[in-house]
Amino acid sequence: MMKKKILTLGCVLMLAAGTAGIDTARAGTSTAGGATKGTAGTGRATSFIAGTDTVATGAAKTAPAGENTVPTGGATDGTAKTATLLTFEEAVSLALQRNPRIAVARNSARIAKNNVHIGNANLLPRLDLTGTATYQEVDPPTGPASDISGTGARMSASYTLFDGFENIYSYRLLQSAGRLGELEARDQIERTLITVGNAYYGAAAAFENLEIAKHLLEISRERMARTSKRAEFGQGGTVDVLAAEVDFNSDTVTVVQARFAWEEARRNL
């Protein structure tokens, strides 16, 4: 009888230890998940602020450590999900390839450069070649019909020796137009790059603001839960509960606004 009681007690102790181990494992998993989530958020903030720009060769990839990236899709709640990331170099490359204003500026510069030729300034000899052909059918009233045909060609060459330096100044004007076209194309490219940079880092800031707002919302939710529990056990008042609810609602509105700002910044990019 004594052995049976000892065995029963041992089973109870083992069962209790096993349950405690499961609870401990759950708590450890929850803690590890929270730490991982917080670390991931910190890593994203570091990648935007102190990361280094590196040339990327893919549109969709996972962000490596220390690289400036902006997520363009996928999860935005800080969970461990794969998202499509866009590096700054990829954004610049897409702008240079697909921006219509840059394409127009480059074509205009190319046209202006092709026009820089001494032939367009009347500095080359002029060669004219003309040809003529005649055909006539004669049908006299008293005789057989006859055909009369003839051909001729003429070639002439001319060169302007002096016209008041008009041709020289015309060539200089063409050269200036060519240089102006290159400068205008460069100016358009630089202004586009500035716009892309502002949009890119604006989207990065909006994403970080969204992550911060979500983190503050989680803190407000935990505070509201703790305040409610304290009020249930008589350790807090109604004023504390209402204040916690007000903070939670305010942080909820902040998250919604931050999400709208992030979506707008991503569309602008």
Image (cartoon, helix red, strand yellow):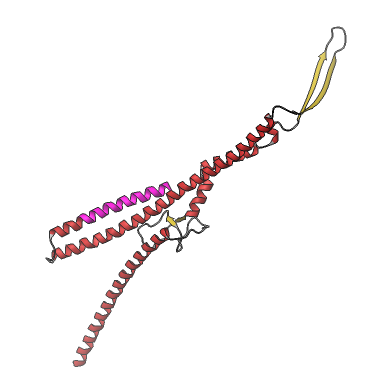
Q: Nearer the viewer, residue 39 or 225?
A: 39
Above or below, 39 relative to 258:
below
Magenta span contains residue 167: no
Would residue 104 be found to the left or right of residue 77 on screen? Answer: right
Above or below, 251 relative to 169:
below
User: Is residue 111 among what the camera can see?
Assistant: no
Residue 214, percent across and down?
31, 57
Above or below, 117 relative to 31:
above
Residue 245: image quadrant is bottom left
Q: Nearer the viewer, residue 247 or 34?
A: 247
Q: What segment carries the magenta color?
A: 246-269
At x 84% / y 16%, what residue is drawn?
A: 147
At x 26% / y 81%, what residue is drawn?
A: 17
User: Is residue 193 among what the camera can see?
Assistant: yes
Q: Main secondary structure of the magenta part?
A: helix
Considering the image in quadrants, where does the N terminus appear? Answer: bottom left
Would residue 48 be found to the left or right of residue 102 on screen? Answer: left
